Image: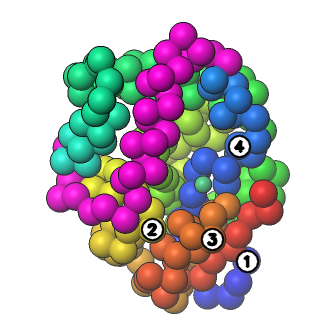
Amino acid sequence: MPNGVRTVVFDLDGTVYDKRGLAGRMVGKLWWCLPLLAAERLARRNMHYVQFADEEEFFGYFFATMSRGHWWGAGIAAEWYRHVYIPTMVRLIGKYQKTRPEVLALMAECRERGIRMAVYSDYGAVAEKLEVLGIDPGQFELLVSAPELGALKPCEPCVRRVMEMLGAEGESTLFVGDREDKDGASARAVGAKFWKVES
Ligand SMILES: [Mg+2]
């Protein structure tokens, strides 16, 4: 760990655990609602670099985008996302995906040295995912997802808000993530250090 780090902000998906195989497993489980799965992926891509006031506006636009040109409405898309998509993802992560030993080691080092930890994710269900991975969510000072703050990473106002919520300064903060364009860019936006896990 670099000198002078007092706060570590972890990305979750692809960082705390290895994401390999998850997309295929999602298709395998959700084959019966493949059009919804495809619409989710496309809508998420369309959300990049769009900033909303809050979570409600973000998901309002997200579910409207997911249902445009389809037989289902935004209400069905929302129900499916909350009651099928996210719970399935959480279950599959718990059952098949492996945590990254080097990231768990860094968490242990933080606990030992009294360095504060947070998780800043691009998806919701942060605590649920940590739990199924066998990681105590209670050890983190903050669990937050970018959509809760109105956008997807690398949204600058969102990452500033995360730093505010933590009362952390960029120079004494380390971001850990698997994506240069999302986690690395978030770190750079607030002048923090970045460690990219090998993926
Ligand atoms: Mg990630």
Give the SS element for disc 1.
Answer: loop
Q: Is mark 4 within 8 Å of ligand 1?
A: yes
* Quadrant the C terminus occupies: bottom right
The quarter of the displayed image where residue 164 is located: bottom left
Task: Tell me if residue 9 can be seen.
Answer: yes
Q: Which residues are magenta?
A: 28-56
Q: Amino acid at mark 1?
A: Met
The chief SS type of the magenta part is helix
Separation (CA) of disc 4 from disc 2: 19 Å
Residue found 54% across the figure and 10% down from its top = 32
Q: Please tell me which residue is depicted at 22% across the width and 58% down the height of the picture.
A: 52
Q: Position of residue 104 (x, y in %)?
A: 74, 53
Whole-percent x, y for residue 98 in the image? 78, 38
Verify CB contact (< 8 Å) between mark 4 and mark 3: no
Mark 1 or 3: in front is: 3
Q: Quote the CA–CA distance across marks 1 and 3.
A: 19 Å
- The residue that label 2 is drawn on is 154
Tag 1 near tag 4, CB within 8 Å? no
For badge 4, the amino acid type reads Lys
The reply to whether discs 2 and 1 touch (Cβ–Cβ < 8 Å) is: no
Counting other residues with Cα less than 10 Å from the Cα at mark 1, is it few (<14), some (14-19), or many (20 or more)? few
Q: Could you tell whether 188 is left or right of 147 in the image?
A: right
Q: Residues within 10 Å of mark 2 (few under 14, many from 20)?
A: many
**N-terminal-most mark, 1 or 3:** 1
Magenta stretch holds residue 35: yes
Q: Which residue is mark 3?
A: 180
> Which label sits on residue 19?
4
